[in-house]
Amino acid sequence: MERDDEWSDETWLVSGGRPHAPGEPLNAPIVPASNFELDGDVLYARTDTTPTWHALETVVGGLEQAQCVSFASGMAAVSSVFALLPTGAHIAVPSDCYQATEGIAAEGEAQGRWTVDRIATADTDGWLAALATADLVWVESPSNPLLEVAELATIAAADRKTGSLFAVDNTFATALLQRPLDLGADLSVQSATKFIGGHSDLLSGVVTTRSLELVERLRRSRTLHGGTPGALESYLAVRGARTMALRVRHAQDTALELARRLDDHDAVAKVRYPGLPTDPNHARAKEQMTGFGSIVSFEVASFQAAHDTVRRTRLIRHATSLGSVESTMEQRAALEGQEEVPPGLIRLSVGLEHVDDLWADLQHALS
């Protein structure tokens, strides 16, 4: 089904990617097949696609009015973008980058595959300076876990090296709250494990672009490197996407209220949430986002205080990842590769529980 230009995002998430002919099921079926009868459009799953992948790519691509390529995980999607680079490339990544993305950058740097500049997410001048030589400019906005916001449109509009790529990790915002492609990015990347799937039960990643050349190169990378998504995971991601708009909206409302309350709590030294008018990223986020998301980072007095706080909750789960129906939180400085994160920082992913129940749990944990 093609997206009607007059349809809202909510309508498309419910309707997109469904079979649409008499006698067909309403839901795209799980197709657990690796190979198909020859002389048709699909020959082999790794090389082509399956109806289940196609449904996921239709839903996500239609949301951004672009083409989508799906992968086995968010990191497979990230890796596919880095795989587009030639040996000897120069790349720019955030200094507060997601640790696995930083791991790819650091590993390639150590192997001599590319050189790396590390730039603070909110440092617009730093990004503009990097554009002259970088083959890939990779930005997270909001960033993980410091929730810094980059000026995406300004970066995209500036002169840059011929043939370079501007990619945005849009996992925290999702395409519902921020459209990197509309702001001028070449590639928008999301871990579909998070808000798209939304139920902590799958691994999946997606890359969207409006360049047919990049679509073909990404598909080739997926084929050659084996980052193909599973049938069940794709099915679950599509099912999760049907309720994504409701989940994102509810969790965002709760996150803003919790951020306000945390900001007034004596045990909290600092709250990082671009939805707060006092946050230094607020004006920038308001300009390019339609909402501020459901991730709140806050700092307590010390590493030990954060260690104790994340283990005292009863309702909020002490777990990694984010964007699911259940609220989770973790101490980011305790993770390998997060040495630059403030020692008392806790990243909270707000789920769908009642705001007062979550607040009572946080008050108990902070007391």
Image (cartoon, helix red, strand yellow):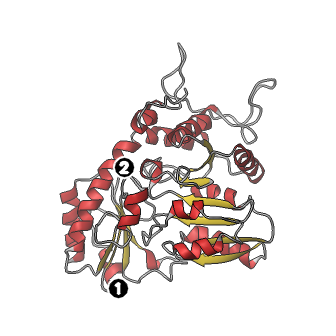
Q: Quadrant of residue 109?
A: bottom right
Q: Amino acid at mark 2?
A: Val
| Marks 2, 1: nearer the viewer | 2
Q: Are marks 2 and 1 in contact (CB under 8 Å)?
A: no
Q: Say which mark, if any, is on residue 248.
A: 2
Q: Which residue is mark 1?
A: 304
Would you identify the image quadrant in which residue 45 lies?
Answer: top right
Left of 189 or right of it: where is 217?
right
Residue 246 in the image: above or below residue 85: above
- Quadrant of the snapshot with the N terminus: top right
Q: Secondary structure at mark 2?
A: helix
Q: Residues within 10 Å of mark 2 (few under 14, many from 20)?
A: many
**Which quarter of the picture shows residue 260?**
bottom left
Residue 139 located left or right of residue 313: right
In x, y percent, where is residue 9?
43, 38
Image position of 174 with respect to 145: above or below: above
The residue lying at 64 percent from left, 56 percent from top is 76
Seen at 30% across and 85% down, the residue is 301
**In the displayed structure image, the side of residue 12 where residue 104 appears, left or right:** right
